[in-house]
Image (tube, rainbow, N blue to C red):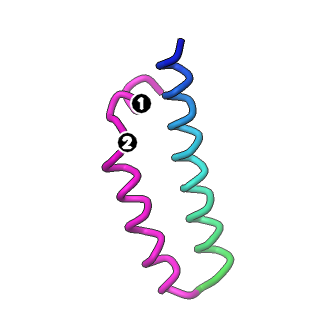
Amino acid sequence: MLQHVDRHLAFLSTLFVFLLFFFTLRKSENLTISMKTTPFILIIYIHSPNKQFSKI
């Protein structure tokens, strides 16, 4: 039960980061902002456990 909730929260946080990234990309056409947010998404993918993506 606890692992399922943890996986759900991790999925929601990943989704939120993607929405924030696309909103930033649409809102401003400044490339420096997107260049700053891209490593942030990569860091989240590296630090997130792989088991959360296997059962989505």
User: 25 above or below 29?
Assistant: above
Inter-mark Cα distance, 2 to 1 = 8 Å
Residue 9: quadrant of the picture: top right
Is the C-beta separation of discs 2 and 1 under 8 Å?
A: yes
Residue 41: quadrant of the picture: bottom left
Secondary structure under tag 2 reads: loop
- Across and down, in percent, residue 34 comes to 49, 76
Q: Is residue 36 magenta?
A: yes
Q: Amino acid at mark 2?
A: Ser
Q: Which residues are magenta?
A: 30-56
**Left or right of 56, for residue 30:** right
Secondary structure under tag 1 reads: helix
Q: Is residue 1 magenta?
A: no
User: 40 above or below 36?
Assistant: above
- Across and down, in percent, residue 1 comes to 53, 12
Foreground residue among 29 and 37: 37
Rendered residue at 57%/47% (across/down):
15
Rendered residue at 42%/68% (across/down):
38
Label placed on residue 52: 1
Tag in front: 2 or 1: 2
- Across and down, in percent, residue 12 comes to 59, 40
Label placed on residue 48: 2
- Across and down, in percent, residue 27 comes to 68, 77
Label placed on residue 43: none
Q: Residues within 10 Å of mark 1 (few under 14, many from 20)?
A: some
Q: Amino acid at mark 1?
A: Gln
User: 32 above or below 17?
Assistant: below
Rendered residue at 36%/59% (across/down):
42
Residue 22: quadrant of the picture: bottom right
